[in-house]
Amino acid sequence: MASKRSGPLQGLRILEIAGLGPTPISGMTLADMGADVVLVDRLQPGAEDLDIGRHAIQNRGKRSIAVDLKTQAGIDTVLRLVEQCDAMIEGMRPGVMERLGLGPDVCLARNPKLVYGRMTGWGQDGPLAQAAGHDLNYVALSGALWWSGQPGEAPMSPPSLVGDIGGGAMYLLVGLLAGIMSARETGKGQVIDAAIVDGSAHMMNLLLGLKSAGVFRNQRGSSLLDGPHWYRTYRCADGNYVTIAAAEPRFHKLLLQKLGLTDDPAFSAQHDQTQWPAQHERLAALFATKTRDEWSALLEGTDACFAPVLNPDEAAAHPHMVARGVYGEIDGVLQANPAPRFSGTPLARPGRIPRRGQDTASVLDDWCNAGAT
């Protein structure tokens, strides 16, 4: 039987076709929020599957069934589950689900209220729809990678965060939940085409507004968030790094005060772009004189807009993160706890990571027998 769940999505049934990339993170987040997420696994891992067993945090809280989608019996099993769920998510290349016999037309015929969520990099159509790609390719084409580097340096994106997670998983979630709300009002399901190029481009709208206003420019290192000395990452004496983001004048003034530079004429004009390179060099030399912890002792918790750059283990142990319970360990696996937080429908502790196919019998019983409505 399904374990007792809590959260705002309690009672929601989601069918997830196992795959790589952002789709499993969408399913994890839905499970974190209380949805009953059933993962349709292969009987055996495929050649390209990343099978990391109990370390697969992206599968926590889900139930796993194992079926052979190359057989009619396997397809029939999935279609029985389609009839009982609110939404289905898949991350295959366009056309794959249709060839399997599980495309939107077939599934919506079985369940007219179904919300069918499709996650791809390039989208369901367009000249690149059938091309292989990964996070870095999608954010490069969408424009989201452009400002992630300094002049003369190659742009570099945090691995799989800007595209797969930000522009992919989160947009699939928003589309899926909006579709479910619509289906409950109208009785009609629909297909959600969530493409990473679309989502990562959509996330650019704040910067595009600044660009249109002349605040941001196509030239790297010349805009408010990628050029000035007061919005940078600095290397410390111990080889670690700190960040400064003192954009507003009052925060910049406090930063200079903390650094002993209040009366230094070299820093008198915060927004004089001609001075930015020299000011950056001065601060780089200054931050290199102390360790990261020494700078943290001086600046952390002030309005100088400061934070140390921490690795995940350090982040989990930081007093602020500990106080909020941001990270935790389950079965020895470090993981971030569910977010965001809900006052009226609090989230439960993250669920377990299932073994492949361990819930086949219970899912079929819950959804297709006693759980059928």
Image (tube, rainbow, N blue to C red):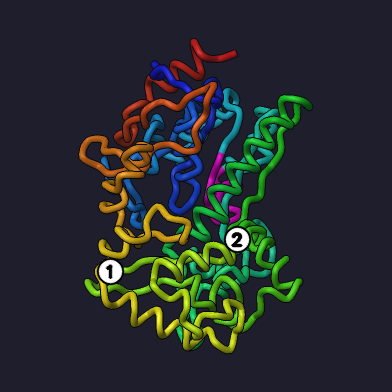
**Point 46% across, 72% down: residue:** 232
Q: Is residue 267 above or below residue 127?
A: below
Residue 90 counted in the magenta span: yes
- Under mark 2, the amino acid is Ser
Q: Position of residue 239 (x, y in %)?
A: 25, 73
Q: Is residue 227 magenta?
A: no
The reply, left or right, for residue 307 in relation to residue 372 is left
Circle 2 Cα neighbour tier, 10 Å, few/some/many (<14 / 14–19 / ≥20): many
Is residue 313 in view from this perspective? Answer: yes
- Taking depth in this image into account, of 106 and 335 the one nearest to the observer is 335
Give the answer, above or below, for where 71 lies relative to 143: above
- Visible residue check, residue 73: no
| Residue linked to disc 2 | 200
Find residue 15 and report its horizontal and vertical position in percent. 52, 33
**Quadrant housing residue 113:** top right
Among the two numbered marks 2 and 1 on one chain, the one whose residue lies closer to the N terminus: 2
Looking at the rendered image, the quarter that the C terminus falls into is: top right
Query: Secondary structure under badge 2?
Result: helix
Residue 240, labelled with which disc?
Answer: 1
CA–CA distance in space, label 2 to label 1: 30 Å
Residues shaded magenta: 89-100
Judged from this view, the residue extending furthest toward the top is 370
Task: Residue at 44% x, 43% y: name it.
Answer: 18
